[in-house]
Structure formats: C-alpha cells, structure tokens
Amino acid sequence: MTKNRVLICTFLALTSGLVGGYISGQITLAIHSQKCQNQGWVLKEVCNAWVTPGAMWQGSTTGLWTGTVLGAFAGGLVTRQSRN
C-alpha cells in the first residue's frame, strides 16, 4: 500500500476536495438565500440571482481547500508506514 502512497493521497485529497466544495457551496447558497426571503416574488428572484454566484464561489472555494487539506491528511494517515 505504501508503494502507491502519492497516488492514494492525491486521489483522496482531490475527491474530498470536490465533495467538500460541492457541499460547502450548497450550504453557503442556502445561508445567503435566506436574506432574500422577506422580499416579494419578483424581488426575491432578482435577489437570488444576484446572491447565487457569489455564494457558490465563496462556499465552493472554501470547501475545496478545506476538503483537499483534510483529504491529504487522511490519505497520509491511511498510507503511513508502521514503525515496527
């Protein structure tokens, strides 16, 4: 398993980064969309259209970085050599 350590760590880091980016983007979008709930129908749609790109960008980049770092850490723990 330690032979492919770099490959395993890279795969785990990228996978967890993409999943973290998606989940964080959805959460941030839901939080930012709550600001638009008190508007009328037309203004709510305009507000959501205005808020969505920034919220998705902010949440996705945060989740991507966090997920990548945590995935690389987890990959390192999984593939570490025993000290025996």
Image: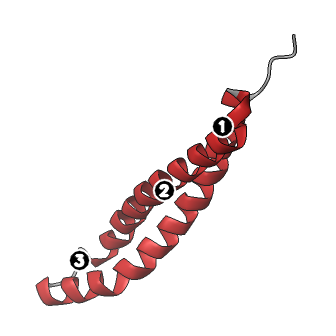
Indicate which disc, 2 or 1, sits on the residue closer to the N terminus. Answer: 2
- Quadrant of the rendering where the C terminus is positioned: top right
Q: Amino acid at mark 2?
A: Leu
Sequence-first disc among 2 and 3: 2
Label for residue 18?
2
Q: From mark 2 to mark 1, how far is it between C-alphas?
A: 15 Å
Which residue bears the numbered disc 3?
A: 38
Which sits in the foreground, 56 or 8?
Answer: 8
- Placement of the N terminus among the 4 image quadrants: top right
Q: Which residue is mark 1?
A: 75
User: Mark 3 packing: few (<14 Cα in 10 Å), some, or many (20+)?
Assistant: few
Q: Residue furthest right?
A: 83
Residue in the foreground of this view, choosing between 21 and 27: 21
Rendered position, 84 above or below 25:
above
Which residue sits furthest front?
A: 3
For the residue labelled by badge 1, is the local secondary structure a helix, a strand or a loop? Answer: helix
Give coordinates of residue 2: x percent, y percent. Answer: 73, 29
Find residue 33 and report its horizontal and vertical position in percent. Answer: 32, 72
Q: CA distance from mark 2 to mark 3?
A: 33 Å
**How does the figure colour the protein chain or chains?**
secondary structure
Residue 3 position, x and y percent, is: 73, 32
Q: What amino acid does circle 3 point to?
A: Asn
Q: Give the residue at x 35% y 78%.
A: 52
Mark positioned earlier in the residue sequence (1 or 3): 3
Q: Which of the two residues, 15 or 7, is positioned nearer the viewer here?
A: 7
- Image side of residue 15 versus residue 10, left or right: left
| Residue found 53% across the figure and 59% down from its top | 63
Q: Nearer the viewer, mark 1 or mark 3?
A: 1
| Residue under the point 68% across and 36% down | 4
Q: Is residue 30 left or right of residue 43?
A: right
Residue 54's mark? none
Amino acid at pointer 1: Gly
